[in-house]
C-alpha cells in the first residue's frame, strides 16, 4: 500500500492558530563545534545553567567562544590572529494558520546581544567562516486537537575577511533584534518580512599598517514544520576597519606621513522560502524564493594624523 505525507491543510482543516512561541532555553540541544565553547542559559522561571547563566536575561541563551584563525603569511608571532567573544540570544518562532481565509505566516525573531574582538593579522584573499556551535529545538504549537511541531536549527559562526596587510586589535558590542519570515495571502501569494534594529557601542581600536579587515559574529537559521525546512535566514552583525597610509619624500630631505583609520558597524540579514512549504497546501514554485536582503552600515569612529620631518640645519 502506497502512502504519502498529509498536508497541513488536511491536518488542521479550518482551525486557526497565531502567536509567537519563545524557545525555552532548557529545551535546546547545543552541540559545540570548537573546543572551549561554553553554553549557558537562563529560563523565564529563574532557573539557570552554565558559568554565565546567573547573569543572563530571562529566556536567553549564551555561547562564549575563542578561536584562532588563519594568520597572514610572514606575520610575526606577535600578530597571530584570533577572535574571542560571546553571543546572547532569545529566539522566538512565529507561526500563524487560518484554514478559512488561507492566510499563513512562518518566521523567526529574537533579541540579540554580542561582543567580540579581533586581534592580529588575518590571512588575506580568503573568507574565513568558522561555525562554532549548533542549536536545535522543537517547540510545539497546539492548533485545536492537532500538535504542530516547529523545528528550529541555528548554526552560530565567526567570519573574517582581510587583505593580509593590516594588524588589528578591535572590539565591538552589539545589541538589537531581528525578524525574518514569509506570509501567504490569497491573491497575492508569498511576501517576505525582513526587519532588524541593531545598535553598536563605541569601539576601541589599535591598528598597525594600512589595510582592510571585517569580522562578523552571526547565525544561520532554519525554521520548518514536521522536520521539513520552510524558512532559512542568515543574520550577521559585523565590524569593518579600513586604514590608509600616504608617505612622501623629496631629495631636499623633507618627508611626511599621513594616516587615516575608519571603523564601521553594520549587519546583513537575508533569507529564503523553501519548496517544502507546499505542506501548507498553497502554491509554491519548485525553487527557493529569496526573501530579500537587508543591509545597514554606520560609522563608529575615525581618526587622521600625520608627521613631517625636515633636514637638520
Image (cartoon, rainbow, N blue to C red):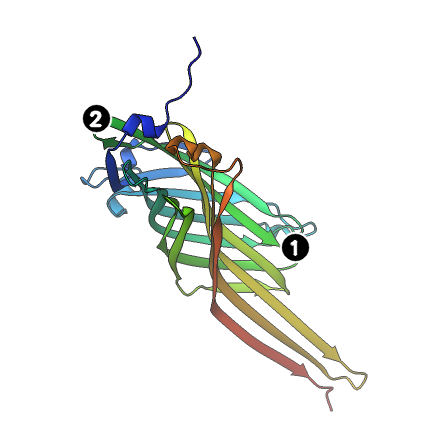
At x 64%, y 65%, the residue is 210
Quote the CA–CA distance across marks 1 and 2: 59 Å
Say which quadrant the N terminus sits in.
top left
Which of the image's four quarters has the C terminus? Answer: bottom right
| Farthest-out residue, left | 45
Direction from residue 143 to residue 34 in the image, left or right: right
Name the residue furthest bottom.
Answer: 313
Q: Does label 1 or label 2 sit earlier along the sequence?
A: 2
- At 62% from the left edge and 60% from the top edge, which residue is drawn? 166
Q: Residues within 10 Å of mark 2 (few under 14, many from 20)?
A: few
Is label 1 in a helix, a strand or a loop?
loop
* Quarter assignment of residue 101: top left
Position of residue 271 relative to residue 32, above or below, is below
Q: Does the image show residue 36?
A: no
Q: Which residue is mark 1?
A: 164
Q: Position of residue 61 (x, y in %)?
A: 32, 42
Q: Horizontal and vertical percent for residue 297?
A: 48, 63
* Residue name at image x 50 percent, y 64 percent: 264
| Place of residue 135 in the rendered image (x, y in percent of width and height, measured from the top left) | 39, 35
Front residue of 270 and 282: 282
The residue to which callout 2 is attached is: 145
- Asked if disc 1 and disc 2 are in contact, CB closer than 8 Å, the reply is no
**Label 2 SS:** loop
Amino acid at each position: 500500500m502506497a502512502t504519502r505525507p498529509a498536508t497541513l491543510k488536511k491536518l488542521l482543516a479550518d482551525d486557526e492558530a497565531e502567536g509567537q512561541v519563545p524557545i525555552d532555553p532548557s529545551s535546546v540541544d547545543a552541540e559545540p563545534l570548537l573546543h572551549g565553547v561554553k553554553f549557558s542559559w537562563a529560563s523565564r522561571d529563574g532557573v539557570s545553567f552554565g558559568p554565565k547563566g546567573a547573569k543572563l536575561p530571562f529566556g536567553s541563551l549564551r555561547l562564549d567562544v575563542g578561536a584562532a584563525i588563519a594568520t597572514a603569511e610572514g606575520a610575526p608571532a606577535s600578530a597571530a590572529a584570533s577572535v574571542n567573544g560571546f553571543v546572547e540570544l532569545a529566539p522566538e518562532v512565529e507561526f500563524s494558520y487560518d484554514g478559512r481565509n488561507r492566510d499563513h505566516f512562518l518566521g523567526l525573531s529574537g533579541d540579540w546581544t554580542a561582543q567580540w574582538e579581533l586581534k592580529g593579522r588575518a590571512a588575506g584573499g580568503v573568507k574565513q567562516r568558522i561555525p562554532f556551535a549548533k542549536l536545535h529545538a522543537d517547540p510545539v504549537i497546539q492548533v485545536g486537537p492537532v500538535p504542530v511541531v516547529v523545528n528550529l536549527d541555528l548554526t552560530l559562526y565567526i567570519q573574517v575577511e582581510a587583505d593580509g596587510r593590516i594588524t588589528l586589535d578591535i572590539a565591538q558590542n552589539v545589541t538589537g533584534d531581528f525578524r525574518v519570515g514569509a506570509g501567504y495571502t490569497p491573491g497575492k501569494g508569498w511576501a517576505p518580512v525582513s526587519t532588524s534594529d541593531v545598535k553598536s557601542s563605541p569601539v576601541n581600536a589599535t591598528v598597525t599598517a594600512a589595510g582592510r579587515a571585517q569580522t562578523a559574529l552571526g547565525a544561520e537559521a532554519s525554521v520548518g514544520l514536521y522536520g521539513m525546512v520552510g524558512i532559512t535566514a542568515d543574520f550577521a552583525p559585523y565590524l569593518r576597519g579600513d586604514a590608509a597610509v600616504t608617505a612622501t619624500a623629496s631629495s631636499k630631505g623633507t618627508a611626511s606621513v599621513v594616516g587615516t583609520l575608519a571603523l564601521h558597524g553594520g549587519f546583513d540579514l537575508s533569507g529564503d522560502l523553501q519548496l517544502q512549504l507546499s505542506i501548507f497546501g498553497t502554491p509554491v514554485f519548485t525553487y527557493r524564493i529569496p526573501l530579500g536582503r537587508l543591509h545597514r552600515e554606520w560609522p563608529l569612529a575615525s581618526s587622521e594624523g600625520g608627521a613631517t620631518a625636515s633636514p637638520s640645519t
